[in-house]
Every structure is written in C-alpha cells, then in structure tokens.
Image (spheres, rainbow, N blue to C red):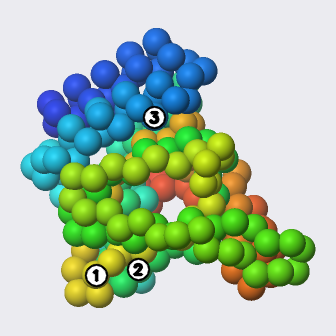
Amino acid sequence: MRVPATLFRQFVHEFTLLVDTFPDDEAQILGKGHDLLAGIVRRDDWLPEAYAQPHPQYYQQYLLHADPADRFSVVSFVWGPGQKTPIHNHTVWALIGLLRGGERSECFQVGEPGQPMRSLGVDYLKPGTVESISPRTCDIHRVSNTYDDRVSISVHVYGGNIGRISRHVFDPQTSMRKPFISGYSNEAEISA
C-alpha cells in the first residue's frame, strides 16, 4: 500500500536505502532513521485524511507502508481525546515521531512474578519530536494522548511488520503478560 504524497514516498525510499545499507546495525538505523522521521513529522501537510481519522473508543493504527521483506513498517497512530494503549512491548526497534497534538510515553520494567511493574519514567512528545525504543533499551511502555479535548497523531516506524508480530500486553499489578497481534485499523483496505 502506498500513501499518495511525494514527501512520504521520498521518506520510504530513503528508509529503504538505510535498511539496505545497514541491515543488521540497529544503532545506525535508529540514528539515521531518527533524522529521516524528524524530517517528515516537522511538516503536517502530507498525511491523507483517511489515515488521520480517530475512533470514539479506540486509538487507530493505520498501516502506511510495509516493506515487502518485512524489514520495517510505517504506521500512523491516531489518538482520540484521552485514549491510551495498555502496557505493551514490541520485540523490535521503533522510532516514534509526533505529527500533531501531544503524546505521553511511560517506560516500564517487569517485576518479579506476581509483583507490580515499575515505572522507569515518562517522556512527553510534542510535534516534530522523535524518540526511539528497542528491546535493548526500553521496549515496554504505555502511550497516551496528552489531551482530553483533541486528537493527537504520531508516525511510527518499526523494525518489522508490526501488525503481524506476536507481542505482549502486561498487567501492571502482577507483571503477567499475554500475547497479542495488533493488526491494523485499515485491515480491510490492506487485504483488498
């Protein structure tokens, strides 16, 4: 699937060259990828309205691009007022750039069996900012819209086809984990 925007097409082309050049070098991908993602989230004129639509109850995860070899995927996350994710992991590296609104990301560490999870801190993203996560650093977090009265949108780049990867959600009180596969909000469009 391709989003019809020159800026986005150029971003996908450059990101493809990046993973071609450094296929196994996470540090290079995150470092150079940070700059590429920052370049597109500084502008809020390229994301088609179809991939910026909130849902009244659930945050939306729209697939914008999936690399044919599943080396990376690009997703827009659309957060309705006050919406948030459960505590979850990714199992792959990720870059998160804020396009519109505000986002709160709280990193967690799993506790001993039956014990609560421990918060490792909170980051706040504003439009144009980018953060990275990785199984090597902090891969477990909960993300929420910082606003209770408006939509926020972020663009995520993952080191795999994130809608197809088996991951986990975590119970904050017991550190128990449960597997899930997220899929995409525009699944019907992708399958067509």
Q: Residue at x 13, y 47 (%)?
A: 43
Q: Secondary structure at mark 1?
A: loop
Left/right of residue 172 with respect to residue 157 in the rendered view: right
Tell me which label, 3 or 1, sits earlier in the chain: 3
User: Label 3, label 1: how many angstroms apart (C-alpha)?
Assistant: 28 Å
- Disc 2 target residue: 83
The reply to whether dot 3 and dot 1 touch (C-beta < 8 Å) is no
- Where is mark 1, residue-wise? 147
Q: Is residue 151 above or below residue 88?
A: below
Mark identifier at residue 63: none
**Looking at this rendering, what residue extends furthest in the left direction?**
45
Q: Indicate the quadrant containing the C terminus: top left, top right, bottom left or bottom right.
A: top left
Horizontal and vertical percent position of residue 154: 32, 57
For the residues bearing labels 1 and 2, Cβ distance under 8 angstroms: no
Kindly identify the amino acid type of the residue bearing the numbered disc 1.
Tyr
Q: Write the residue at 65% across / 46% down.
A: 135
Quadrant assignment for the N terminus: top left
Label 1, label 2: how many angstroms apart (C-alpha)? 9 Å
Q: For the residues carrying marks 2 and 3, which lies nearer the camera in this image? A: 3
Dot 1 alpha-carbon crowd within 10 angstroms: few under 14, some 14 to 19, many 20 or more: some
Residue at the location (46% across, 28% down)? 29
Kind of residue at badge 2: Gln
Neighbours of disc 2 within 10 Å: few (<14), some (14-19), many (20+):
many
Label at residue 30: 3
Is 188 left, or right, of 159 in this rendering? left
In the rendered view, would you say 128 is above or below 55?
above
Mark 1 or 2: in front is 1
Percent coordinates x, y for residue 80 in the rendering: 32, 77
User: Which dot, 3 or 1, sits closer to the camera?
Assistant: 3
